[in-house]
Image (cartoon, rainbow, N blue to C red):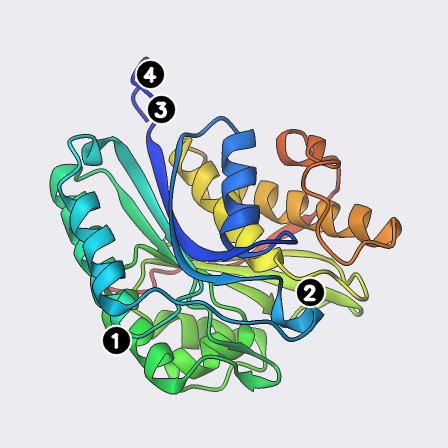
Amino acid sequence: MTPGAPRPEILVVNSQVVRGAVGGRVAVFALERLGFKVWFLPTVLLPWHPGQGRGARHVASDETFAALVEDLLGADTLANIGAVVSGYLGAPSQAHGLARLVDKIKQVNPDAFYLCDPVCGDHNGLYLPEETATAIRDDLLPRADVATPNLFELKWMSGLAADTEQAAIAAARSLAPRRVLVTSAPALRRNAVSNLLVTAKGAIAAEHGIVPDAPNGTGDLMSALFAAHLLDGLDDETALKRAAGTTFEMVARSVRQGARDLLIASEQASLVGPMAMVSCRRILDLPIRA
């Protein structure tokens, strides 16, 4: 970011819940608390996270979503957007609309980047229709500058095994984005989890202890924070360490208070000044791609 220039704005494309702190709700809160102006395009409306009980799933028609995208494409302030952060999609057609938005934003602001969190499943398997997951893989990942898959999503998107650190690096290298941040990657320490960032310069692992019964929304928070720190001009390692430290601290504080949701409001001090220590180590210093 050029010194003295207006701070870039961020477009978040993600789910909206009425209650809780997941999807767009946690991403928008975190980014606004960090001082960013945020555009928010909801992809699906839910009463709460599906893991907290059954609830109706409301997805705008393809025509309605396309009309929203068309309006945004014509916005006279579209060039103010410096980053797009996408997560959960409600339908495969939304990937096409989002792709159009990303292309247009990069056209009017060549410095803008796109972070794709390819939300589609976890250790239990796909929880999106395969058609939607395929649209994310085929339409969005090739456009992304950064991807933030969890370990299952890395395996599904790459079609490769990723059960060791080296295998996860190889799988991340096979994806199109220049930066791939693998959350829930294999860690070297026992009872720990790794956030593995694979870049053109090598790979960096940020490890911290596992917090049992962690609330949902950690991936949404991690992706938003990492994008924010990159947009602020932090180097990869510093951005990774700060995002991982904040997420770990937010989870630990929420669990300590017995909350089933991330306490992003009452514990918002962790967003701006995390105190949790996260160990970082460089794994490779070799170019990933020619």
- The residue mark sitting in front, 1 or 2, is 1
* Tags 3 and 4 touching, CB below 8 Å: no
- Establish if 88 lies above or below 251: below
How packed mark 2 is, by other alpha carbons closer than 10 Å (few <14, some 14-19, many 20 or more), is many
SS of the residue at dot 2? strand
Name the amino acid, label 4: Pro
**Cβ atoms at labels 3 and 1 below 8 Å apart:** no
Residue 7: mark in rendering: 3
* Disc 4: which residue: 3
Q: Which amino acid does label 1 sit on?
A: Asp
The percent coordinates of residue 16 (x first, y second) are 50, 55
Is the residue under label 2 in contact with that under label 1 (CB below 8 Å)? no
Q: In this view, does 197 lie above or below 82?
A: below
Which residue occupies the foreground of this view, 87 or 167? 87
Between the C-alphas of marks 4 and 2, the distance is 36 Å
- For image coordinates 38% across by 80% down, the residue present is 158
Point out which mark residue 193 bears: 2
Compare marks 1 and 2 and give the one earlier in the sequence: 1
Q: Mark 1 points at which residue?
A: 138
The residue under the point 58% across, 45% down is 243
